[in-house]
Amino acid sequence: MTNQSALLKSITAIVPKLIGTTVFLGAFWSNPVLANTLNFEQIYIFGDSNSDQGNVLNSSGGFPPEPYYYQGRFTNGLNWVDYLSSDLGLDPEIYTELNSGEDGINFTFGGATTGDENLSNLMNGGNLPGLQQQVDYFADVLNGGTANPDALYLIWVGPNDYVAALDPFFQQDIDPTTIPTTAVNNFSNAISKLNDLGASNIVLFNEADVAQTPFGRQALTPEEAGFVGSLIQQQNILIEEEVNQLNQANPDLNLMTFDTEQLFQDILNNPSQFGLTNVTNNCSGINFPILPSPQDYSPCSNPGDYLFWDNQHQTTAAHRIIADEVLFALESELTNSSKVPEPSILAALGFFSVGLMMKKKGKL
């Protein structure tokens, strides 16, 4: 067994610039009727490239560009925020194009970490936000007012914390073994800020195993991948413990976790149950953030069958799956919590969710 310092040295020699790396999870049906039982008045999203609908594009002057990526999304079409918002009958504005924010706001920026940093800044010397600044942006928008307790707040961010530590390009002197605790402390800080502002219904996505992306499969040895995976498992245990503590300490808080780690494993093990056939390969051939020349750009002809659009990000088909799973989980959890009108329609619809868990106060 390689000792930890040697293993870290090996990893840092090969981990590339992964902005917004994260992996999917979900099921493949669309349940717009479920949204009829959810009465959220607004939706607010905080995170990285998985959820960015154009904030980085507007801030960078053209990245990620078409035709490689779709209208500022880090995928080949709409992302899960587009799909979920539509299912809920909402149309949130992105922060960089904020007008009224009547239906909510998407504060996410590709490259965000759970803290104050954004990987784009480390590459280009910019000033893009991490999760903590995104929450501060929300407070600024409120301008001393109170957050809507009947809105939905979603947080999905985390892989870039590992990238900043493991990739020598970013020159960040971070011990990777400290990341789980640091990330969970950052989540706790952001959630507490949101709750203090008046937010109640908050969903925190836990971490999926970045070592099982196309990049991870190619670049990491089994031992290296196992080391990264063990840190992520540790982080998810700490997330569950922190969620339980925050809920117990704040009776007005309805904090839930979306178990992306387990769902990612489920889709890898049972792709056909999710309507996919290829859950390992890179459809576009793009090794993000390096884009091929136009003449060399030749994506696969069937992206709807793929989990991954590039070596890190999901296809729009996978994003549709994510949105469906989040919608299903919300309806199930909030119906059981008597937060939405009864009766529940789940049994009548006959839907099931492979491996999905929405956890609240230690309850599955």
Image (cartoon, helix red, strand yellow):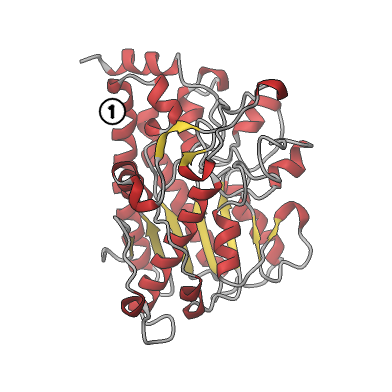
- The picture places residue 57, in percent across and down from the top left corner, at 73, 41
From the viewer's perspective, is 159 left or right of 284? left
Q: Amino acid at mark 1?
A: Gly
Q: Is residue 294 visible?
A: yes
Instruction: Say left or right for 325 vs 149.
Output: left
Placement of 43 over or under 120, stated as above or below: below
Tally of numbered tags: 1
On the image, the x and y values in percent for residue 180 come to: 37, 39
Quarter occupied by the C terminus: bottom left
Residue 314: % across, % down: 51, 42
Quadrant containing the N terminus is: top left
Q: What residue does disc 1 label?
A: 226
Depth check, front residue: 261 or 177: 261
Residue reaching furthest to the front: 301
Name the element at disc 1. Answer: helix
Q: Nearer the viewer, residue 296 or 11?
A: 296
Q: What residue is drawn where x is 31% and y is 44%?
A: 265
Within-10-Å neighbours for mark 1: few <14, some 14–19, many 20+ = some
Q: Nearer the viewer, residue 335 or 171?
A: 335
Report whether residue 254 is seen: no
